[in-house]
Image (tube, rainbow, N blue to C red):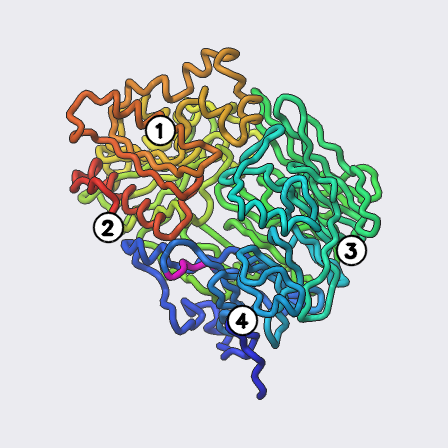
Amino acid sequence: MILPVIDAYTVAVMPTRARSAETANTHPTGVIAEETPFADFTDIAGFVALPRITALALSPDGKRLVAAVQRPDANGSKYVSALWEVDPEGLAEPRRLTFSVKGESAPRFAPDGALLFTSARPDTEGEQNGSANNGQSHTAIWRLREHGEARVVADAPGGLGIAGVAADGRLLATGSVVAGGSSDTDAEARKRRKDRGVTAILHTGMPIRYWDHEINDTSPRLNLVDPVADGKAGPLTDLATDADTVSLLNATADLSPDGRTVATTWTRRDRRGETGTSLVLIDTARRRRKVLLRGTSAHGYAGPSFSPDGSTLAVTRVTGSTPTDTSYDFLELHPVAGGEPVAVEVGDLTIGEYVWAPDGQTLYVTGDLHSRGAILAVDPATGRVRKTIADDAVYSSLHAAADGRYLYALRSTIDTPPTPVRLTVRRVGEPRRLPAPGWVAGVPGTLEWVDTDVAGIRVGGWLCTPKGASARRPAPLMLWIHGGPHGSYNSWSWRWSPWLAVARGYAVLMPDPAMSTGYGHAGLNRGWPRLPDVVWHEVETLTDHVLQRKSLDHTRTALLGASFGGFMTNWIAGHSTRFKAIVTHAGLYALDQQHPTTDAAAHKVRVHRTPDDLPEWYAKYSPHHHAAKIRTPMLLTHGSRDYRVPISEALRLWWDLVSGFDGKPQDLPHRFLQFTSENHWVLSPSNSRVWNETVLGFVDQHALGKNALPDTVFDW
């Protein structure tokens, strides 16, 4: 056998040793030589270093399945993604395909079976093939045949992403140019700004930030990439040269199968800092744009997806929130030529993603459902659900095989990380797990659904209990409140893993109270507009119900929450003294300050008005008005680059805690863990370890009476 050429960054596909069907789903790791199943959740460093599968790609013939897998880099400063081959049959061992230091992500197959991906790795042949990525740090689009080396097929100074692939191989690529410039002048404009050290942005309206980065210094773009022979970067055609800095901001787009039309969201600025998002169609040949679905103050659009014949668009219509109603998502099927849409009936499901069957006769929809998740098979002619393919877990990165027999997806539960699985469409049964990196052998406790009645409503949540908890040795309890508030405890979390606490002897209760996803529009709106007393009543009632168990210790409890959950912990801290410790991450504190300074200011002010408009609401619900009543030791954790909940919230709470403490400075029970490089989430491996060690140590100290944390963060 002649082996393919192997470069320094990519290993082309080679045969792997197959295993029997009898052992395919029982082998813990897929026999990856360098890995063993992870089981020790007391090892926080080991947990942080676990491989994390983030996406799947299925080849057109259904014979190849590729996964994007993240791991820490050598220094533990960031996660780097690589591509792995996973056997769709679950018989062969998974095998790593790419190895660059920069990493590879966003896998997607071309019609001819070549694997596309994005990477910022250097193109060593850039000068010969026309690539601009000659050792630069921006991402390009690469192409890897089943045998051979990866080549750059599209590149631009601002980096590119893959948004769609047509049947003839043309690509829809996302990108950007410096504001006020064009693709022709972009390279020079970026170099000039960098060389001169210019970091100024002249804002002309809202928004000006998004989550963790500034906007308005560049203008997002959509580009058509013509197919070219391997070894050369294809030319880019800017499909919206008149786009300003917000037109394609966070746009979702798709390319029709024939490559003639792009469907994309298009955002415009409205009065009083608001924006509106329409759905437009762009003729790729003439680069002409027309509005298909016009956004208004009442609703906008997102997530366009062409049917296989290009005649229909699946679209999510998103309503605008008001003081009396939250925002709702409606899945609709719109004829591209115009006409009445078909409304998709998803029941209580909160829409996650959707994908067409290759024959166009079925639309598969995933999302949150009843503190778990589901996959629905929808008849696009009527919008009705034909059958439920699965309702046992949260499914993402969904792909339908060409022969219509199977679905492939990442399956996740509270006690199982995202794992590739194959589901049989015609016969509903247990998903077949496909061996892949990062297999977890088991969790250090039991997982149980618990619920109770709260004023005629069943409110439930997941209870994780450590092994050995009993009436003789009752476990202390952590109560976690999720963020959102539109969220759900229904799947594995790498950032907030209950099993790290369970391994240290804690039970963890994770409720899904009012405003949680997966309980229909009524569930989303119960407790709106973000009423902490409604949520707290439901959460506390469930907590009291669970604490009736003799295996749980009601005298040793702690409260934790992040984002909206952090807002809840901040508010509860001024209304209850039942907990021994409170941890609040990225929590809202002074609403008069947070609402106009968050990156989502228009939404917040639209819903909650101002303190002058609603003084009683702010007096009752803004946690800073109740700071004087806080008696519980609090740990604040916050990222300096958090623009959704600016760090000014933590700074103000920290001042109130410190200045309001009458004891000696060395006796201050509160702590503030600041991450100067993190945003709304703690994402780097090293900082994640510090966060977990600090949070668990703080709760250990105050709930269990263990030694106090050190005054400084050492190199764990």
Determine the main secondary structure of the stretch shown in magenta: strand
Give the x, y percent position of residue 588: 42, 28
Q: Any mark on residue 678, and which?
A: none
Q: Which residues are magenta?
A: 70-74
Q: CA distance from mark 1 to mark 3?
A: 51 Å
Q: Is disc 1 in contact with disc 4, using a CB cutoff of under 8 Å?
A: no
Amino acid carrying label 4: it is Thr
Q: CA distance from mark 3 to mark 2?
A: 60 Å
Q: Residue at x 84, y 43 (%)?
A: 337
| Mark 4 surroundings: few (<14), some (14-19) or many (≥20) residues within 10 A | many
The disc placed on residue 10 is 4
Q: Which residue is mark 1?
A: 651
Q: CA distance from mark 1 to mark 4?
A: 46 Å
Earlier along the polypeptide chain: callout 4 or callout 3? 4
Residue sitting at 32 percent across and 20 percent down?
627
Residue 76: image location, x then y, percent: 37, 56
- Sequence-first tag of 2 and 1: 2
Residue 72 is one of the magenta-drawn residues: yes
Ranked by sequence position, the earlier of labels 3 and 2 is 3
* Residue type marked 3: Gly
Relative depth, front residue between 602 and 34:
602
Does the CB distance between marks 3 and 2 fall below 8 Å?
no
Q: Which residue is mark 2?
A: 468
Q: What is the residue that sits farthest to the front in this orientation?
A: 196
Which image quadrant is residue 270 in?
Answer: top right
